[in-house]
């Protein structure tokens, strides 16, 4: 192990990357992603990368992200990564803090010569990752039944055995879409749906009863997140013929525990760029201890956030559920090199030290919406 030297520089740069095709969700149309690349460099030249990219519904714009990253940067410059990790600076702002948090951990894992997942497992007291590929689900966002059927055929040809379809706008129209998906899938592949909180309790139950006929294995977030979400999810789960997963309603370890204690869910969706790295790690450990499945999912992240999610997914107990790790190809480009991409429906765990990705200067110039800014020593 080579101890990481003191942090000499923290810099960040905003980016915006369009989706190759717009995606319709229960929360509206998503056409592009934007966020910050975060780069931490030590006095001895080691570099760690992170990403901060909340979804639009989370209300953190790029300006607010940059202000928070600058605030954190001023507290860690001059300290070693070991002294700065884990972050402890007032109230957590998960969607912003995760960029600094991930870059610090990338530096520390790299200084140990360890892949990120192995370093995380050692830190958290979890079993070391097996190294086997992480199964992924294909995300289908087409609006028409015919287009969805074509997308299913393409997903099957690429080796995916689990697909997820966005629903929540119109039950009858969604029923036609799911009927087409199931016909193209055949009887054995797994079909999940994601409502993104689009339904009331009563509408959720009616929709889930209607969609049961399509062989749906899991519904993510049928009702909106918020102060009543635990009770709402528990009520829906009690009468739903389809198992329920919490997504937007589970952003912290406290959320996870409250949902489990209420018997509100059958599974959890964990999005590391939303929860933060340390929090996601704690949530994985708690869910494993209580024998409840977790699905690690990206949020149309760049290769930095995707690599983070893949490493965390490697810590899930075997057999791992298919995770939502196949969204990077849906972006029109990336800002790093070296991120794993789906192959036969799964992603290989990077075996290089740290996250295993390197900044692509030409790509970040292409997608940047502003210059590099930073806090030097």
Image (spheres, grey):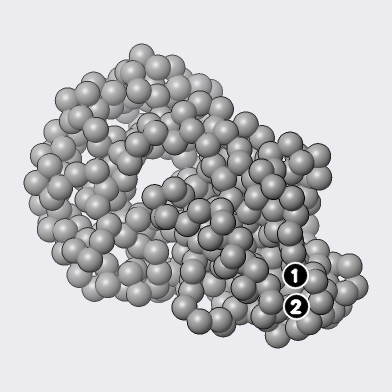
Q: Residue 251, position in %: x, y? A: 39, 64
Q: Is residue 148 above or below residue 242?
A: above
Left or right of 258? Residue 149 is: right
- Residue at image x 44%, y 48%? 56
* Labelled pair 2, 1 in contact (Cβ < 8 Å): yes
Q: Residue 222, position in %: x, y? A: 24, 47
The 10 Å Cα crowd at callout 2, few under 14, some 14 to 19, many 20 or more, is many
- Residue at image x 49%, y 47%? 299
- Residue at image x 47%, y 64%? 275
The 10 Å Cα crowd at callout 1, few under 14, some 14 to 19, many 20 or more, is some
Q: Which is more toward the observer, 101 or 117?
A: 101
Q: Residue 133, position in %: x, y? A: 61, 48
Q: Nearer the viewer, mark 2 or mark 1?
A: 1
Mark yes or no: residue 242 visible.
Answer: yes
Q: Which mark is residue 124?
A: none
**Quarter that holds the N terminus:** bottom right
Q: Residue 35, position in %: x, y? A: 58, 50
Q: Secondary structure at mark 2?
A: loop
Q: Is residue 21 above or below residue 253?
A: above
Left or right of 78? Residue 55 is: left
For residue 256, what is the image quadrant? Answer: bottom left
Left or right of 232? Residue 85 is: right
């Amino acid at each position: 192990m080579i101890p990481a030297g003191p942090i000499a520089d923290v810099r960040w740069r905003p980016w915006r990357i369009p989706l190759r095709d717009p995606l319709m969700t229960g929360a509206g149309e998503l056409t592009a992603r934007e966020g910050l690349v975060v780069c931490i460099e030590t006095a001895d030249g080691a570099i760690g990368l992170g990403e901060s990219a909340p979804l639009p519904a989370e209300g953190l714009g790029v300006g607010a992200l940059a202000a928070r990253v600058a605030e954190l940067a001023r507290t860690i410059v001059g300290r070693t990564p070991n002294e700065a990790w884990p972050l402890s600076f007032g109230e957590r702002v998960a969607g912003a803090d995760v960029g600094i948090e991930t870059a610090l951990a990338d530096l520390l894992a790299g200084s140990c010569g360890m892949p990120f997942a192995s370093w995380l497992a050692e830190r958290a007291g979890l079993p070391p990752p097996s190294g086997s590929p992480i199964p992924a689900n294909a995300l289908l966002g087409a609006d028409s039944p015919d287009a969805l059927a074509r997308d299913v055929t393409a997903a099957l040809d690429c080796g995916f055995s689990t697909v997820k379809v966005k629903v929540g706008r119109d039950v009858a129209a969604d029923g036609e879409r799911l009927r087409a998906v199931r016909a193209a899938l055949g009887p054995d592949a797994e079909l999940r749906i994601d409502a993104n909180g689009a339904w009331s309790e009563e509408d959720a139950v009616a929709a889930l009863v209607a969609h049961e006929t399509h062989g749906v294995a899991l519904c993510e977030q049928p009702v909106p997140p918020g102060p009543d979400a635990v009770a709402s999810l528990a009520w829906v789960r009690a009468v739903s013929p389809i198992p329920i997963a919490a997504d937007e309603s589970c952003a912290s370890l406290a959320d996870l525990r409250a949902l489990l204690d209420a018997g509100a869910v059958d599974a959890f969706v964990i999005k590391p760029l939303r929860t933060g790295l340390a929090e996601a790690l704690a949530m994985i450990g708690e869910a494993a201890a209580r024998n409840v499945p977790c699905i690690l999912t990206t949020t149309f992240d760049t290769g930095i956030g995707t690599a983070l999610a893949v490493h965390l997914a490697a810590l899930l107990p075997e057999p791992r559920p298919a995770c939502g790790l196949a969204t990077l190809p849906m972006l029109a480009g990336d800002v790093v090199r070296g991120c794993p991409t789906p192959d036969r429906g799964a992603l290989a765990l990077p075996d290089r030290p740290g996250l295993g990705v390197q900044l692509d200067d030409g790509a970040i110039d292409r997608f940047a919406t502003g210059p590099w800014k930073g806090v030097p020593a």
